[in-house]
Image (cartoon, rainbow, N blue to C red):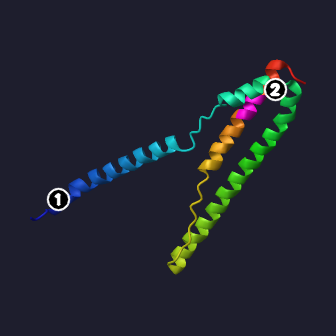
């Protein structure tokens, strides 16, 4: 079977367009799935918040805020370290033909951060609703 050069010239743009379209669809699908943690406060935590006194709520809020900030900073540091490691790995791959890459998954930490944030927001809402000072 002989393929004519004109056939290849006519189908190449179509194949490129199809490949770009599939890549775009895959990128949008992955972006929409990434870090979509819609974590709410579970019933047990909400009951504990509702049963707590103003003093307890005011005492716990700064602890949750500090834990949330610490975890967010930890995730940021881990991602920055991973990016730096991968840049060095890409450079050594390009120059020496051997590269070291890091694949650090922060999804568990991100889920924990979303849960901490939800509890902190619930605490803040309870403090404001009750007028605690």
Q: Residue at x 75, y 28 (%)?
A: 48
130 falls in the magenta region = no
121 falls in the magenta region = yes
Image depth: mark 1 or mark 2 in front: 2
Q: Which of 94 and 67 is in front in this view?
A: 67
| Extent of the magenta region | 119-123
On the picture, is 123 further left or further right than 7? Answer: right
Q: Quadrant of residue 63?
A: top right
Which residue is the site of mark 2? 52
Which residue is the site of mark 1? 6
Q: Which of 2 and 32 is in front in this view?
A: 32
Q: How crowded is mark 1: few (under 14 residues within 10 Å), some or many (20 or more)?
A: few
**Mark 2: which secondary structure?**
loop
Q: In which quarter of the image is residue 2?
A: bottom left
From the top left corner, tell me how far across and down residue 101 is, in percent: 56, 67
* Residue 51 marker: none
């Amino acid at each position: 079977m002989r393929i004519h050069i004109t056939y290849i010239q006519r189908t190449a743009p179509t194949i490129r367009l199809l490949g770009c379209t599939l890549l775009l669809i895959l990128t949008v699908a992955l972006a929409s799935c990434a870090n979509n943690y819609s974590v709410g406060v579970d019933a047990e935590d909400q009951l504990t918040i509702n049963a707590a006194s103003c003093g307890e709520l005011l005492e716990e809020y700064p602890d949750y805020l500090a834990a949330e900030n610490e975890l967010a900073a930890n995730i940021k540091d881990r991602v920055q370290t991973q990016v730096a490691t991968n840049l060095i790995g890409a450079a050594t791959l390009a120059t020496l033909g051997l590269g070291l890459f890091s694949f650090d998954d922060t999804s568990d930490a991100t889920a924990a951060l979303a849960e901490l944030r939800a509890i902190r927001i619930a605490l803040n809402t309870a403090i404001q609703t009750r007028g605690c000072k």
